[in-house]
Amino acid sequence: MKNLKIDETKYTPEMTFDPETLVIAIKGKSYPENTEEFYKPAFEWLEKNLSDLGKKGLTVNLELIYFNSSSSKALMNFFDMLEESVDNGDNITVNWMYEEDNESILEYGEEFLEDIETLPFNLVPLKSRE
Amino acid sequence: MLDDLYGVTSDLGNEGIFFCLSGPMSQELLVEIGGAIKNKMLMDEASKSTMSQVFSIIVEMVQNIIFYSDEKLEYEQLGETSSCNVGLIAVGEEKDSYFVMSGNMIKNEKVNRLKNRIEKLVAMSKDELKKFYKEQRRAGPDEYSKGAGLGYIEMARKTSRPLGFEFREIDENMSFFSIITYV
């Protein structure tokens, strides 16, 4: 399996996959100018590997400190894709991490949770970094 | 011009505006604007949530200028013509709230469509906006949108007072569109 590794920039998050722990980690900010283009390689990687990973048990850790409205759309597509996999019997868990004093990231997580039916989706508070 | 510059800056100050940039916008510039506003708001001891809401509105507005402004600055680079879209972004404070404004040129033929869209959002309650946002997030953008078509809904949801907006006709081709949100 070709590994997923996209480095962080000032306005796009780091995306990595650890084949040992079966964890996809997405971390940082997300407000690219062209969101669709930016997320395309990650979605393509996921399409190729999701059925295999879902059987083994996949964890997705999201630690976004800021994202724009078109990234929110990309995230919704991402969760829909994972949910479809869960509906086909796969084992996937999403952890939505937020700094405990950043209410707006918590609220975004809660709103995703409202729109998700079967995908396990946890809201995980983190200690504030400042 | 030079002796008017103090007048310009004191006019901005009198309006409560502490940051204002008018000219060609870019993604790189947006990152720097975000950094400057963050420093100012850290000094104000604003909450993380407020900072992130103000930043969010700046991002949506500047990216709207980058995508949709009809005033363009063309330049040659390595034999290719590139263009940068021109607009204005301003951030200020008024009593207990921050405000973010943006302005850019728009072709007259596009005015009605945008005006109807924003008027529709202004008439909605916060619950209706939330529902509409979620519908649009799943439905995808319309044919005129280059992003997800969620930017104005996001602004309408974040603003603590109704969105203010204006279209001023400049000539037979262009109007100036301005919009303000409060956090």
Image: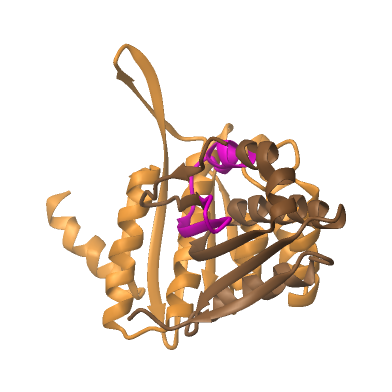
Chain colours: A brown, B orange
| Residue farthest to the right, as pictured | A88
Q: Position of residue A76 (x, y in %)?
A: 70, 56
Residue at 41% x, 28% y is B83
Residue at 42% x, 74% y is B51
How many numbered circles does the render carry? 0
- Rendered position, A69 above or below A99: above
Q: Is residue B115 something one can see in this rendering? A: no
Q: Position of residue A114 (x, y in %)?
A: 78, 72
Q: Is residue A89 left or right of residue B111?
A: right
Residue A35 sits inside the magenta stretch: yes
Residue at 79% x, 66% y is A115
Q: Position of residue A97 (x, y in %)?
A: 55, 72
In the image, A11 versus B68, the foreground residue is A11
Q: Quadrant of residue B120?
A: bottom right
Residue at 66% x, 47% y is B148
Q: Quadrant of residue B74?
A: top left
Residue A62 sits inside the magenta stretch: no
**Extent of the magenta region:** A18-43
Q: Position of residue A41 (x, y in %)?
A: 56, 36
